[in-house]
Image (tube, rainbow, N blue to C red):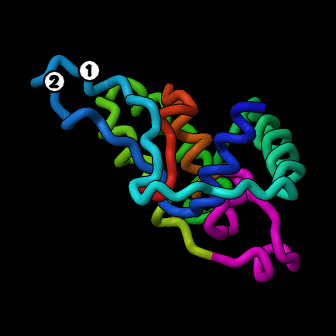
Amino acid sequence: MARTLYFLRAVALCSTLTWQAPALATSEGADATTPPPAPAPADGSRVSLNWKDVPLWVDVMARAGNEETATHVCSDDASPDSGDCRYAAWRNSLPSLRNLPAIERVNAVQTAINRLPYVSDRQNWSMSDRWATPAEMFARGGDCEDYALTKYFALRELGFPDGAIDAGQ
């Protein structure tokens, strides 16, 4: 439940996911590879959670869990620009990012995900709100929550705990 509440806060802010290392250096003895807890919003604002989003979270977690256990390959007859091939390449690149410093992992995730096209839920799914899994995001693009979700799943897979992933900073 804590993970659900935390992510709903991130989605409510609906911006880029960020991580801030303590001065991005170890001069003060801080370990720049270990992300700190997420900071509070700079303006002191509070986020109201919309409980109608809980079913969306439960649904996308189930669908994304199935993706994580699946094997992702680019078939010989598929275009390298197809969503399946882009997602397979992305999934296959994640292990090579694990040993990078934290800020480099974050930058790699930001760069890759921000290249995906913005497409509204209405255009993509003919409905007002649907949260896409990472594979769906790579295949079809997505809206704000889909960017946040795709970054969230990638950063979690790269070893960042929930408390180190925040939105809107």
Within 10 angstroms of label 1, few (less than 14), some, or many (20 or more) residues? some
Say which mark, if any, is on residue 31: 1
Placement of 14 over or under 74, stated as above or below = below
Residue at image mark 2:
26
Q: Quadrant of residue 30?
A: top left
The reply to whether discs 2 and 1 touch (Cβ–Cβ < 8 Å) is yes
Amino acid type assigned to the residue bearing label 1 in the image: Asp
Q: In the shown orientation, is residue 5 left or right of residue 108?
A: right
Is residue 136 rendered magenta in the image? yes
Name the spot of residue 82 as percent of width and height, x first: 63, 64
| Magenta region | 119-146
Mark 2: secondary structure: loop
Placement of 88 over or under 145, stated as above or below = above
What's the CA distance linking mark 2 and mark 1? 6 Å
Name the spot of residue 72 as percent of width and height, x first: 68, 40
Q: Is residue 111 visible?
A: no
Is residue 128 rendered magenta in the image? yes
Within 10 angstroms of label 2, few (less than 14), some, or many (20 or more) residues? few
Which of 39 and 59 lies nearest the eye of the viewer? 39
Q: Is residue 84 visible?
A: yes
Residue depicted at 34% across the width and 32% down the height: 102
